[in-house]
Amino acid sequence: MFITLKELLHTLLLPPGGPLLIAAAGAWLLRSRCAAGTRRAGWLLLGAGLASLWLLATPLVADALAGVAEREPALDLTRAPQAQAIVILGGGDERLAAPEYGGEPAPGPVLLERIAYGAFLAHRTALPVLVSGTAPEALAMRVSLARDFGIQVRWVEERSRDTFQNAQFSSRLLKAAGVSRILLVTSSAHAWRASHEFASAGITVVPAPVGVWAPRESGLLRYLPGPTALGRSSAALYELLGDLVRRGLAALRLRTQES
């Protein structure tokens, strides 16, 4: 139920759903027979919703939000040997029966980016690999690492449904194997929050973010909306809100951490 509620809030609050909901509320007020003041509020809501959707879909705003959310720099490869294992987190876009792979599991773009970098680090360091996510995510990661990159996964954590559970369940496997320091592979916007969750579970983290953003557009293109920039804005806002929730739950002591 909690996961369903979280997904519903994600859809309703973050772009494009959030701005469209505001615009729809404004349109509804304009269509209703109400006082002039209410109609003015309708125009304001409609304009605010459409304007915020446009702005969030521009590279200018997406870059600004990414700059706030992406607080972990790219990994200094000289630090990689200091870790004892590599942990790769699921990305939620796995495919369980990809036709082009003969019906085998395959990662989607977000997950593939994490897998590819985790495999690069594994080849470079010879460190063992743990994959963490839902059962479908973990299966897709394990199969792809072996089939596409020649990496055999040492540990599979397949019960977690969010970042907190990633850290809690993975830390048990790692501690049982005597591992206390890891390279944590995840998306750049997610790296800050994920690192804090693993640290709270008693694991020392060397963040290894992927997709660290560098502005590509210039001139007028930075003000033109597009789906790529909208996706980046949504991802950045999701992580910023997620970090606020993490801090709030920790302050209220509503979570039980690993000892």
Image (cartoon, rainbow, N blue to C red):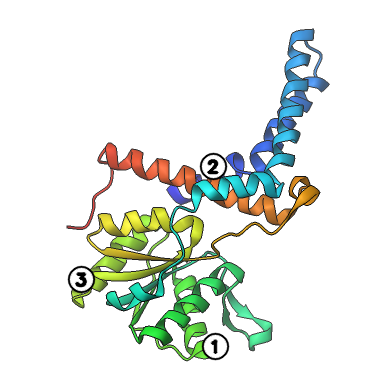
Q: Which residue is mark 2?
A: 9
- Quadrant in the picture for the C terminus: bottom left
Residue 173: x %, y % from top left: 26, 73
Identify the mark at residue 218; answer none if there is no mark. none
Q: Nearer the viewer, residue 87 or 147?
A: 87
Identify which residue is drawn at 78% across, 15% down: 39
Residue sitting at x 49%, y 76%:
117
Pointer 2 local density, CA inside 10 Å: few below 14, some 14–19, many at least 20: few
Tag 3: amino acid: Lys
Per the model, the C-alpha gap separating discs 2 and 3 is 34 Å
- Label 2 residue SS: helix
Q: Amino acid at mark 1?
A: Asp
Q: In the image, is 107 to the left or to the right of 167?
A: right
Residue 162 visible in the picture: no
Q: Position of residue 186 (x, y in %)?
A: 46, 65
Percent x, y for residue 212? 54, 62
Q: Is residue 212 left or right of residue 242?
A: right
| For the residues bearing labels 3 and 1, Cβ distance under 8 angstroms | no
Q: Mark 3 — residue?
A: 175
Q: Secondary structure at mark 1?
A: helix
Along the viewing direction, whichever of 214 and 160 lies nearer the viewer = 214
Amino acid type for the residue under numbered disc 2 = Leu
Quick one: label 2 or label 3, which is nearer the N terminus? 2
The residue indicated by pointer 1 is 148
Q: CA distance from mark 2 to mark 1?
A: 36 Å
> Is residue 84 visible in the rendered structure shown here?
yes
User: What secondary structure is marked by label 3?
Assistant: helix
